[in-house]
Amino acid sequence: MSEADHEQNTAIPLNDRTRHPNLWFEDGNIILATKFSVFLVHRGLLSWSSPVFADMLSMPQPDIMETTLDGLPGIPVVELSDDDEQFTHLLRFCYNARYYQQYMPTTFEIISALLRMSTKYQMDGLRSEIIAHLGVIYPVTIEKYVETGKPDTQLSLFPPFEGQHFAVSNLARETGALVLLPAALWKASCEPEHNISRGSVSGDGKKHQLDPLDVRKCLAIKLEYYSIYVKTSFTIPFRTPSLCVRSGREKCSKVALVLLGAHFAQTGPCDILLHWDSFDCWSNEVCAACMEVAASLFLQTRKYLWSCLPGRLDLPGWHIVASNDSQIPQA
Ligand SMILES: [Zn+2]
């Protein structure tokens, strides 16, 4: 017996499934059935919302059968394979456009369900809005990425949760939202090694784990970029400009070196594309000319590492991932 046959045989009989309390309209003219629920809704609204529904409902299909739902003779029933919760979110959105609004705070459950469902039901406008909204935290430019460090930026999307970057990476892979992947996998790589390898459990008890290939990519880039960070942190202070006003024991590079040693003795890897922690420990202790030159070199290095990010994660370059979907690169 195939898995599908088994599923069919163990399905709850139609009349025993829960009639959704809010998505049950007495004047509805089509019944949609998921594994545990039935919805009495409007054929015209569904067809207007999605070309897939329009096709599905415009012609007789083998899976549109005579109703067997008690007390509702003549209303056709369509069996759907969608997840109950995710499909409910989609229907709620179809009936109430304010259920999800671009750039307004929502929940991960709603935004992830709507991205999956809008992809499946070819609701391109909704899909584009959601991807651009997720791009607030998983952007395509380093300038936007720096803003993701502010708590307000995350809260404009949904409340942060343990394992979020693993969950978003998996969601982006599943829905083909390639444009979100470089930043999502990079943020995933900034998690502790143990979490990258074994996954993290969020407050609602769900485990979020990358697939083994992405685990390897994240661990590799974490090591590679951290090595570059340490090397660059110790190299740049020696690029002393001719305008440096200090010399001898007070020389800026010597001051920086001592402070850098203390810094790295106390700290481990950080999100180096967000912020260059090792510069903070000495930037205010050297002359203005040295500080300015170093700041510019650090910025150049971070921009270079950002430009290399998709390639290092075996993804196409930024211009290709950005054109693959709707998130427009912003200056
Ligand atoms: Zn100096």
Image (tube, grey):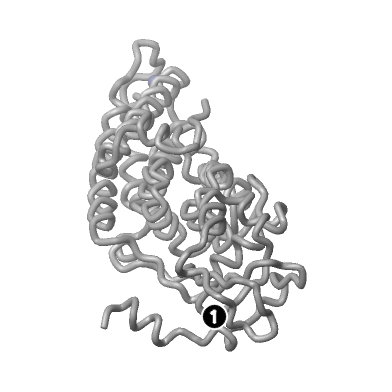
| 17 versus 224 height, above or below | below
Q: Position of residue 118 (x, y in %)?
A: 52, 52
| Few, some or many residues within 10 Å of mark 1 (<14, 14–19, 20+) | some
Q: Position of residue 234 (x, y in %)?
A: 28, 34
- 106 to the left or right of 183: right
> Does the numbered disc 1 mark a residue whose Cβ is under 8 Å from ligand 1?
no
Q: Nearer the viewer, residue 242 or 44?
A: 44
- 152 to the left or right of 113: right
Q: Nearer the viewer, residue 306 or 175?
A: 175
User: Looking at the picture, which amino acid does disc 1 mark?
Assistant: Phe
> In the current view of this chain or complex, which residue is farthest to the right?
26
| 9 versus 90 height, above or below | below
Q: Position of residue 218 (x, y in %)?
A: 29, 52
- Taking the spot 34% from the left edge, 83% from the top edge, the residue there is 6
Q: Secondary structure at mark 1?
A: loop
| 81 versus 12 height, above or below | above
| 257 versus 270 height, above or below | above
Q: Position of residue 76 (x, y in %)?
A: 60, 71
- State ligand 1's quadrant: top left
- Taking the spot 64% from the left edge, 67% from the top edge, the residue there is 30
User: On the image, which quarter does residue 280 sit in?
Assistant: top left
> In the current view of this chain or complex, which residue is farthest to the top?
242
Q: Is residue 46 visible?
A: yes
- 133 to the left or right of 29: left
- Taking the spot 57% from the left edge, 72% from the top edge, the residue there is 77
Q: Nearer the viewer, residue 183 or 37?
A: 37
- 206 to the left or right of 310: right
Q: Is residue 271 visible?
A: no
Find disc 1 in the rendering and name its residue.
Answer: 36
Q: Quadrant of the N terminus?
A: bottom left
- Callout count: 1
- Taking the spot 68% from the left edge, 67% from the top edge, the residue there is 29
